[in-house]
Amino acid sequence: MCIFCKIVNGEIPSKKVYEDNDVIAILDISQATKGHTLVIPKKHYANILEIEDSEYIKVMKVLKNVTSKINDAYKPKGFNILNNCGEVAGQTVMHYHVHIIPRYDTNDIKLEFTDHSDKYDLTEIMHDLTI
């Protein structure tokens, strides 16, 4: 059983800021910034590729409400809403969850996107990915 399932089942303590029948929101133990929160479905799904649409929608509704509460409480200048999918992307707990990371300064945390546009043909990618 994963650590988030243990938290959901009450086997491991957490700092819950929200809970309903399907979703919990807990303070991230690392607190990358003040108010850093995780929104987690109670049912176990490894990642975004596995979560059922109905459960995903429930998580997103809670995500929006908790983000609003953080905004009202701490007045950050912005937010990073982040989901890591797979170990290579930084996922360390294989239970779908979304990070709400309030941003107070551009140097709070570092997320860096490197420009590789010279390596890829966007028309080709668009063709491959168009639904």
Image (cartoon, rainbow, N blue to C red):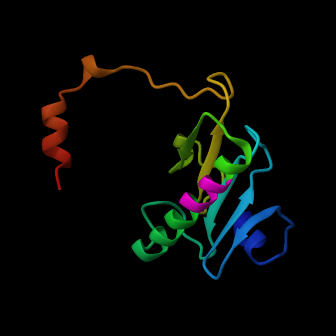
Q: Is residue 97 in the magenta section?
A: no
Callout count: 0
| Residue plotted at (61% across, 59% down) | 94
Is 65 colored magenta in this rendering? yes
Q: Left or right: where does residue 88 sit relative to residue 116?
A: right
**What range of the chain is rendered magenta?**
64-69
> Can you tell which quarter of the image residue 74 is in?
top right
Residue 25 can be seen, yes or no? yes
Vertical comparison of 6 with 131: above or below: below
For residue 21, above or below residue 31:
below
Q: Position of residue 121 (x, y in %)?
A: 18, 27
Identity of the residue furthest to the top in this view: 118
Identify the residue at horizontal 82%, vertical 76% (top origin).
10
Indicate the quadrant containing the N terminus: top left, top right, bottom left or bottom right.
bottom right
Q: Is residue 104 left or right of residue 123?
A: right
Q: Main secondary structure of the magenta part?
A: helix
The one nearer the camera, 76 or 41, is 76
Q: Position of residue 119 (x, y in %)?
A: 26, 21
Any part of residue 2 in sight: no
Q: Is residue 90 left or right of residue 7?
A: left
**Residue 89 position in % (x across, y down):** 52, 42
In the image, residue 22 sits, relative to residue 74, either above or below, namely below
Q: Residue at the bottom extreme? A: 21
* Image quadrant in which you'd find residue 31: top right
Q: Residue at x 73, y 37 (%)?
A: 33
Residue 105: % across, % down: 66, 25
At a point 12% along the width and 43% down the height, the residue shown is: 127
Q: Quarter holding the C terminus?
A: bottom left
